[in-house]
Amino acid sequence: MPSLPVLVLNSGSSSIKFSLYQACDSTQTKLFEGAVDGIGTDLGKFWIKDAAGKKLVDQTPALPTRAVAFKLVADALHSGSYPAPAAIGHRMVCGGPTVQKNQLITSELIDEMERYTAFAPLHTPIAVYIMREALRLFPGVPNFVCLDTYFHRTMPEVVTHMPIPEEYSAMGVRRYGYHGISYESIVYQLQPNVPGRLIVAHLGNGASISAIRNGQCLDTSMGLTPTGGIISGTRTGDIDPGVLLFILRKIAQTTESASAAADQLEIVASKKAGLLGVSGRSNDMRELREAIRDGDAKARLAVDKFVWTIAKWIGSFVAELGGLDMLVFTGGIGENDIATRAEICAGLGALGIMLDPERNNTRGKATISADNSPARVRVIPPAEDLIIVNHVVRLLGE
C-alpha cells in the first residue's frame, strides 16, 4: 500500500483528541496531534503540536457544544496547513452486541451502534456525532470504527455471560470490557516477546485491569459498561446491586418518573462515586496525594480503596492465569504515580511481584521490578492512536 495520511479521532465526554499519521504497511509516522478540551465548560482549550512537540496552535476558545468543538478541528484540517486525510479512524468504546469488529463506517452502522448508547453513555453520543460529521465534512474519505471491545472478543463465555435471566442476555447484556485499544497497544509494544501470562493495569481517571494469555484477553475487570470493575475517578466499580437498589428507592421518593430516577442513579454511579465520592474532594490522584500529605483522612481512605481493589484484581488474575510472568502499569496514574504503584505491589510478594524502590522512582517507560522478582514489572505508556492507524491500514488492504 502506498504511504497516505491517516487521521485518528478519539472522543471523550468533554474532549476530542486527534492525530495525523503518514502510514503504510510497515511504517507509521506521526505528523501532528491535537485536542479540544473542556467542552461544555469555561476552560476550553484547542491546541495542535507537531511531532517534535512544537505548538502550532494554542487557543482558549469558548466551547459550549461538541458541534463548536469539532468545527474547530475540521476547519483546521481543511485550512491547507496540514495534509488532507486519505482515511479516518475513530475510537469507539462499544458498538453493542451486533457491532463487534473494526470495520468501514456507514450511516446504517452508526445508527446500529447508537442503539446501544446505554452501554457507554458518557462516550457513545459524542462518538456517533463525530462519525456523522466526519462523513459529511470529509466526503469520499473512508472512515473506520475501531472498538475498545474488539480486543476483549477472545474472552470465553464463562467470563462474558452474566448470571441473569436469559431474556436480558438476549438483549446483549454481557461483559464486554473496555480500554481494549490501550491493552492491544501494550501487547503490540511487547512484541516479539509477549509474555505468556501478562496482567496490564490501565490506571487513569477511568481504571481497569486485564489478564492476557499469549497475547489474547482472557478476562478483564469492566463489564457491561465502563462503570464496573475497579473503583475509578468518579465511578463505583463493582458494587453490591443492593446498594444501587437502595439509592434508587431513595431517589424515587422525590422523582416524578422511573426514567428520571434511573438517570439520577446513573449520575451517582458514574459521575459522583469512586475516588471523588469516597474523598468528598477530588477525582484527581495528584490532588488526593496532596491532601494526604495535609492529613486528610478521607483522601487517604479513597486512595487506599483504589489500591486495595487493584491488588485484589491482580491476585484473582494471577490465579486465573495460573501464575504471572509480567505486570504492566499504563495510563496516567499507572505511568506517573510512583506511590500508587508501590502501594499496589507492597503486599504482592507471594505472587512473585517485587519492586525495586529506586527503579520505581521514575515516570514514563521503565522496568521497575527488583532483580530477584519472579515476575517482571514494567511501566509502558499506551499507544492507542498507533493501533487505530494499524487497523485502518489493514482494513484498507482488505
Image (cartoon, rainbow, N blue to C red):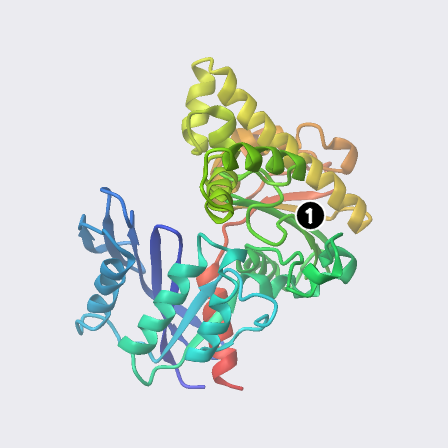
Instruction: Report whether 62 appears left or right of 86.
Output: left
Percent coordinates x, y for residue 140 in the rendering? 33, 85
Residue at image coords 69%, 34%: 354
Residue 76 vertical position relative to residue 136 in the rendered view, above or below: above
Residue 370 vertical position relative to residue 9 in the rendered view, above or below: above
Q: Nearer the viewer, residue 40 or 353?
A: 40
Mark 1 burial class by Cα count in 10 Å: few <14, some 14-19, many 20+: many
Residue at image coords 79%, 49%: 320
Q: Classify mark 1: helix, strand or loop.
A: strand
Work out which residue is located at the far top of the displayed protein and give it. 295
Residue at image coords 47%, 19%: 292
Percent coordinates x, y for residue 174 in the rendering? 67, 58
Percent coordinates x, y for residue 232 in the rendering? 53, 39
Q: Nearer the viewer, residue 350 or 125?
A: 125
Q: Nearer the viewer, residue 373 or 272?
A: 272
Quadrant of the rendering where the C terminus is positioned: bottom right
Q: Which residue is mark 1?
A: 326
Work out which residue is located at the far right of the displayed protein and give it. 322
Write down the quadrant of residue 167 in the picture.
bottom right
Instruction: Report whether 319 appears left or right of 98.
Output: right
Write down the quadrant of residue 53 in the picture.
bottom left
Count of numbered badges drawn on the protein: 1
Percent coordinates x, y for residue 44 in the rendering? 24, 47
The answer to whether residue 281 shows anywhere in this view is yes
